[in-house]
Amino acid sequence: MPGCCAFGCTNRCSKGFKLYRFPTDPQRRKLWEVKISRVGWKASNSSRLCEVHFDCHQFESGRADQKRKLKNSAVHTIFCHRSILKTRKSPKKRQTEVTNNLNKHTSHLKDHSYASNPSQRSSSEDSASTEDEETATPSTPKLQVQLQTQMKQIKKFRDALRKTRKRYRAIVKAKTKQNAKFSRIFAKDQLESLSRVNMKGLKWSSYTVKKALQLRFACGSSGYKLLLQQHYPLPSERTLQRRMESMPFEPGILREVFDYM
């Protein structure tokens, strides 16, 4: 199975990540290759890119099938190895703004001697320029650190989800095998009786009654009562008596009785 072709990314389908093919359109395919920023690399037909590198705006919304499908104009923008660029004012533009502000204040302070002093004016320009530079200096890339932390958490949650699904499939498979083994010994109504607190209102099938009568005739009343005391899923003796009372007895040989013996 192919993995993600982005630099430093080890995501694969086996880890629970969805991979996307490169566009067949030459222009969009070239744009994807440029965005990956790998020197001398060109995408092949087997190259894939995982879903982590696409933001939420690159996917189609409101799909009835709930599938994560990329838009026709989707472009990947998220990469761990790439720092976040911050815009910064040009030094010339900043110097011009400071000079204009000083000229504006100087025009209102012509009568003051310190306003016309070139040394004080130069020092004020330097202090204003220094303060502006400190304001424009980019801060620590906290957003990049938060993004990496969130990606690690998402990967951790997906690994846990994959393990949970694997355990669930194993439990379902074991339960199916267990039910198949139980069905060889007990009928459906007997399995239902095992999950109930009491037998009140339970309707025993003719197959179960026939099997219970065979056990009753084979082991006698004491043996049958012992099976009931050990909580075997069998109808009571009173239930068997009622079923026997409802059987049609006619003169001659009752061949149906031989089936219960």
Image (cartoon, grey):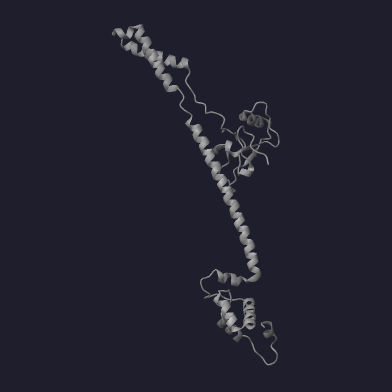
Q: Is residue 143 toward the left or the right of residue 223 in the image?
A: left
> Can residue 160 be seen from the camera position used here?
yes
> Can residue 235 be seen from the camera position used here?
no
Most foreground residue, 112 or 150: 150
* Residue 122 screen position, x and y as percent: 38, 10
| Image quadrant where residue 99 sits | top left
Residue 87 versus residue 214 in the image, above or below:
above
Residue farthest to the left, as pictured: 111
Residue depicted at 59% across the width and 39% down the height: 51
Most foreground residue, 70 or 211: 211
Residue farthest to the bottom, as pictured: 251
| Image quadrant where residue 225 sits | bottom right
* Residue 208 screen position, x and y as percent: 62, 76
Residue depicted at 53% across the width and 35% down the height: 148
Residue 93 versus residue 50 in the image, above or below:
above
Question: Which quadrant of the rendered structure holds the N terminus?
Answer: top right
Residue 66 versus residue 102 in the image, above or below:
below
* Residue 169 screen position, x and y as percent: 61, 55
* Residue 28 screen position, x and y as percent: 65, 32
| Image quadrant where residue 47 sits | top right
Question: Which quadrant of the rendered structure holds the C terminus?
Answer: bottom right
Residue depicted at 59% across the width and 80% down the height: 224
Q: Is residue 63 toward the left or the right of residue 136 in the image?
A: right
Residue 71 versus residue 202 in the image, above or below:
above
